[in-house]
């Protein structure tokens, strides 16, 4: 039986040496600051990593993190469905950094906004465009209506279609080499 536990930043920090940390944010978010030693496996690539994570969980405890805890909780649920136990970090990397704990940054990485911030910018911009264009073209207001409806649907279902679309943008996509390197590192040394 698998369970999903939650660790506070204090608990995770005390146990960091014994945890395998999986960061499920986009590569851009990960590069801008992650827990020391974390491996980046974006949420939309998690199914590709399940077999490696199952073996990794047998060697020790998994801690799944994201920006605030929502994506890591979804990742833990998906892993549990595959028989993999993992804990999530309460409050995510935001809570971790907020307590002043160290975060690693990828060398030469350009800071990328958190997905939630990207969604707010995109949604707000589209609503504003629809309203402004609606002065000349009344049907343009339908854009604002569609975005508002999408936001309501997102809140009711705790999903976000716009985040799924934004995650496909180049700065949010994993490089194949980066994901493969994370999976190789997690797999450990090959058996002879």
Image (cartoon, grey):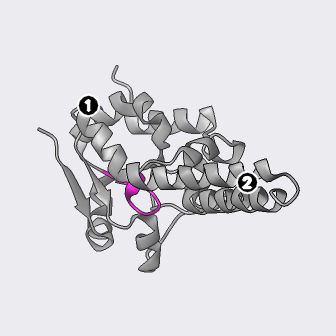
Any magenta on residue 88? no
User: x%, y% of residue 126?
Assistant: 72, 55
Residue appearing at x 63%, y 62% in the figure: 113
Q: Give the quarter of the figure containing the N terminus.
A: top left
Residue appearing at x 59%, y 47% in the figure: 162
Answer with left or right where residue 123 lies relative to residue 16: right
- The foreground one among 175 and 153 is 153
User: x%, y% of residue 109?
Assistant: 69, 57
Q: Which residues are magenta?
A: 63-71
Of the residues under marks 2 and 1, which one precedes in the sequence? 1
Q: Give the quarter of the figure containing the C terminus.
A: top left
User: x%, y% of residue 110?
Assistant: 71, 59
User: x%, y% of residue 28?
Assistant: 62, 52
Q: Which residue is mark 1?
A: 82
- The foreground one among 87 and 123 is 123
Q: In the image, which is nearer the foreground, mark 2 or mark 1? A: 2
Residue appearing at x 77%, y 48% in the figure: 139
Residue appearing at x 33%, y 36% in the figure: 53
- The foreground one among 86 and 191 is 86
């Amino acid at each position: 039986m698998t369970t999903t536990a939650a660790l506070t930043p204090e608990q995770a920090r005390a146990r960091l040496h014994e945890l395998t940390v999986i960061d499920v944010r986009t590569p851009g978010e990960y590069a801008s600051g992650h827990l020391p030693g974390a491996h980046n496996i974006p949420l939309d690539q998690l199914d590709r990593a399940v077999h490696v994570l199952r073996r990794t969980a047998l060697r020790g405890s998994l801690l799944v993190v994201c920006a605030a805890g929502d994506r890591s909780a979804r990742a833990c649920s998906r892993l549990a469905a595959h028989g993999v136990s993992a804990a999530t970090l309460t409050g995510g990397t935001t809570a971790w950094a907020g307590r002043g704990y160290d975060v690693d940054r990828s060398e030469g990485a350009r800071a990328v906004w958190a997905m939630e911030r990207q969604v707010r910018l995109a949604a707000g911009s589209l609503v504003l465009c629809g309203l402004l264009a609606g002065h000349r073209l009344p049907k343009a207001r339908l854009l604002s209506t569609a975005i508002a409806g999408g936001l309501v649907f997102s809140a009711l279902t705790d999903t976000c279609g716009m985040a799924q679309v934004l995650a496909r943008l180049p700065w949010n996509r994993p490089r194949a080499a980066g994901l493969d390197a994370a999976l190789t590192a997690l797999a450990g040394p090959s058996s002879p």
